[in-house]
Image (spheres, rainbow, N blue to C red):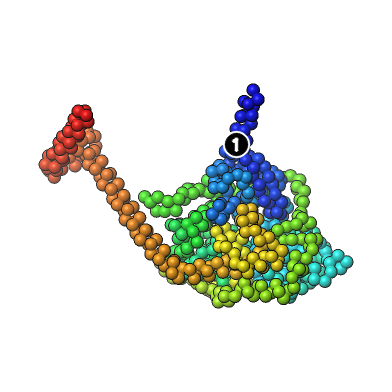
Amino acid sequence: MLSRFMSGSIRNLEREYSCTVRLLDDTEYTCTIQRDAKGQYLFDLICHHLNLLEKDYFGIRYVDPDKQRHWLEFTKSIAKQMKSQPPFTMCLRVKFYPPDPASLKEEITRYLVFLQIKRDLYHGRLLCKTSDAAMLAAYILQAEIGDYDPGKHPEGYSSKFQFFPKHSEKLERRIADIHKTELIGQTPETSERNFLQKAQMLETYGVDPHPCKDVSGNPAFLAFTPFGFVVLQGNKRVHFLQWNEVTKLKFEGKTFHIYANQKEDKKIILTYFAPTPEACKHLWKCGVENQAFYKLEKSSQVRTVSSSNLFFKGSRFRYSGRVAKEVMEQSAKIKREPPEIHRAGLVPSRSCPSITHGPRLSSVPRTRRRAVHISIMEGLESLRDSAHSTPVRSVSHGESFIPRSRSQATDGSEGMAVISDEAYSPSDSVLPTPVAEHSMELAVSRQINGAPCSIEEEKESEAGTPSHGEGGDFGADGRSAQEGAGGDSALSEVEQVNKFVLSVLRLLLVTIGLLFVLLLLLIILTESDLDIAFLSDIRQTPEFEQFHYEYFCPLRRWFACKLRWVGGLLINK
């Protein structure tokens, strides 16, 4: 009896596993779920824990053993998606940025989006000009510590916060001045709402960067935002396509294509190259989901999308969930008492440490920190103010991409939009693609800033560990470019040969299929007794009768003879 009970308990344990999800305030939620549980079940548990109703904007992200990041698919089993062994570690993140985050129905939703954008700001994904950066940082100060108090906030108190990948004394003074004079009396909720209103006006709002290269080998960052598809190079946004202009997204291996129709039926095709095929597939799936979420009117309009052409095998993917318009309509129907919010201002945060935990950078002189920044940025100056325009394969060359407007689409304008005084270079620890091993200089800069140097820890937890990664990704791209001078050219030739062979094989298969269909049609014409007018007319033509008696009947008798001969051999054996 005891052995039967023990064996039953062991089987139950084998059917369950532990799962830890790191939330946006860097706290962790751990639960035990069944092995066959789907992603939706875990997501519902987290939303119930957070008392979150406007949950369609959020998703769960994880990292596979190859350091490739993925969004958890809610319609599939968790265990089948994870390529590692339990216990599993994942992260809750904003997957679809609200077009107007300040107008979200509930404060709890606005607060979670605020935490995500604050994280984006800290890791360099939300890049902006110095004046905008100072205002955003001042809103964070006001939300976390309240009004300025000379007794509590000594000189230089703003330097104890780490808002951006790197600071300057001038910027810190400007942040403190705004906090002292312009934000007095604002509650945390008001400061967070003002922060969201300011952030959503920036060119890099909602950007989840995918590092790629254009057809000339220049590094670029591709992203999908609430307003369309963007390409960032240097400190400029070189391309922008609104969602209603995007017609198709496609990938083959490491090559990603985006098809679009602009004004006056001007068709263009943009081509980029991802670091790995897995990264390219992830980029494609993100694009399919974002296009469905922001572009469609109803979820019933969602269709299964294929990554390849007709007759050819490729990846198939279907977005599952509500679209933005349905989410906003559903949010308007929410009627409940606002849930209590436990703000994390006094909790140690890996993404933006609080002032109550002491100076993050006080152990190292400012001049030493600047020297480290300079050493990291060496070799990147050629990219800082450059804006390598990605070559475009187009049917007709027309206007450049229309700059984004927060209200609605505006008139097109020539030229590229400058997004910042600095080159766009988010920290590599937060990119949704594999990242190269860090150099010693980058590790030193992490230690200087008080951040853990455990690369595996940050990649497994997707926690977005702070790093002075200004240029970290472009540094990786630079190394790739140097290695690619010899290896990439040979690899590209091999890939081209493989693509040619694969195309020939596909053409051959299609030809054989067509011949098979024609053979079936011929048999129907000659052997069937179908009384159809056009078949009868064909059978009565002299040409068909000649073909039937002189070619088809002898061929049929020959096949029948061979089949009888083979059957006799099999029977005799």
Q: Is residue 294 left or right of residue 2?
A: left
Residue extending furthest top? 1
Task: Report the front residue among 497 and 396.
Answer: 497
Horizontally, residue 408 falls left or right of residue 449, namely left
Residue where numbered disc 1 is placed: 14
Residue 139 or residue 470, whichever sits in front: 470
Quarter of the figure with the C terminus:
top left
Residue at image position (56%, 43%) is: 79
Q: Quadrant of residue 487?
A: bottom left
Viewer can see residue 225? no
Residue at the far right in the pictured view? 151
> Would residue 436 be visible to someone looking at this image?
yes
- Could you tell me which residue is drawn at 66 percent across and 72 percent down? 372
Q: Give the class, few, some or many, for how many residues have Cα within 10 Å of label 1's Cα (few <14, many ≥20).
A: few
In which quadrant of the rendered image does the N terminus lie?
A: top right
Is residue 265 left or right of 44 when viewed as pictured?
Answer: left
Q: Position of residue 471 (x, y in %)?
A: 60, 69
Q: How many discs mark residues in the rendered view?
A: 1
Mark 1 element type: helix
Please name whichever residue, 243 or 254, is drawn nearer the observer in this view of the structure: 254
Q: Position of residue 137 (x, y in %)?
A: 73, 66
Residue type at mark 1: give it: Glu
In the image, is residue 435 above or below residue 175? above
Residue placed at 76% from the left, 73% from the top?
A: 173
State whether residue 546 is above or below residue 140: above
Q: Residue at the spot x=61%, y=46% of the render?
A: 88
Residue at the far front in the pictured view = 3
Find residue 349 and report its horizontal and vertical position in percent: 73, 57
Residue 485's x, y, as percent? Answer: 45, 70
Question: Could you say which quadrant of the image residue 546 lies in?
Answer: top left
